Image: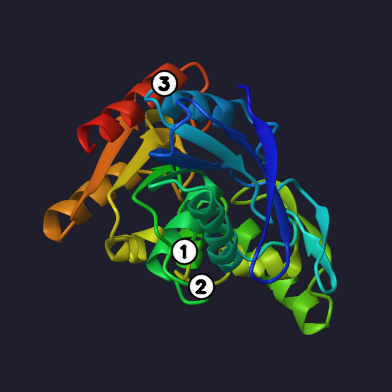
Amino acid sequence: MLGHLVDVQTQDGIKLHGFLSSASGDRSWIWLVIHGVNGNFYGSTLLSELGHCVQGLGHDALLVNTRGHDLATFGSADYPARMGSMFETISDGQVDLAAWIRFCKQLGYQNIGCIAHSLGAVKVSYALAHAERVAALDLARFVAVSPPRLNTELLLNDSAKREVFDQQLQEARAWCDKGFPHHIMRVRFPLANWVSAETFLDKYGSGQKYDYFAYWSEINVPTLWVFGQQEVRHGSVNFRDMDQHLLNAFESGNHGAHRLSVIPEADHSYRGKRDLLNAAIGDWIRSDS
């Protein structure tokens, strides 16, 4: 993918970087493509292929970092900032998304869409439904690719992992109570990772605050929810049967422009099935154009 590096500064002074690639030279459509946990804009083949997908429709692509990119990074605003997935707060995604949208508007784009994977999709969905800290997030369309449900009670109901998860919650609370919120923990569930006590509680110990199933109906832009068949049939408890749950919710409520697609035989990373993923996204974009 040919293009050039760009950067923005968020409202709270954090510098973020991205990669802008133009398909047609006009400023009709651009799509923000956002990584998941531990990820970044330059190391993900999935993000690159999603960028190629929208370029195949004649739209521009902007692959971007949030402040939660990579495992741990360092940012300098008015004060030193711990960043990366070990230290992120999901609600900060509102500020990051607003900075990238503002950047696209300054370039003169008429329509801005967003495709976000995994935790990135949680950040964007939360931002769209709870735009509390920033001005209106002016997105024309949103594709949420495999967002996990971040729901404390749901995770505690996993019969095989509830004991491990409860121990991790208690450990994280203990470190925060002792005044060490940035203590790094090695956790095993719901995702094997290294994470600070404070961030673990924000992501997994905040009840249903970040559970998109609780607020999806507040997202007022046309949205495509995409999952891999393997993750919704055989995945962990925060993915299991989410397609069926969302379809039931769509049928019982006012789902507006929300749509659902399940990619046959695909896992969370869509290995070997990205042509099907891109086709589903492309068909939805064309149908709503």
The amino acid at mark 1 is Ala
Q: Nearer the viewer, residue 15 or 162?
A: 15
Residue 166 placement (x, y as % from top left): 62, 65
Asked whether residue 142 appears in the rendered view, the answer is yes
Mark 2, residue position: 134
Mark 3, residue position: 56
Asked whether residue 158 appears in the rendered view, the answer is no
Sort mark 3 into few (<14), some (14-19) or many (20+) by Cα contacts within 10 Å: some
Residue 187 placement (x, y as % from top left): 72, 53
Q: Where does the N terminus fall, quadrant-wise?
A: top right
Q: Residue at x 40, y 24 (%)?
A: 278
Res. 225 image quadrant: top left
Q: Are marks 2 and 1 in contact (CB under 8 Å)?
A: yes
Mark nearer the N terminus (3 vs 2): 3
CA distance separating discs 3 and 1? 28 Å
The amino acid at mark 2 is Val
The amino acid at mark 3 is Gly
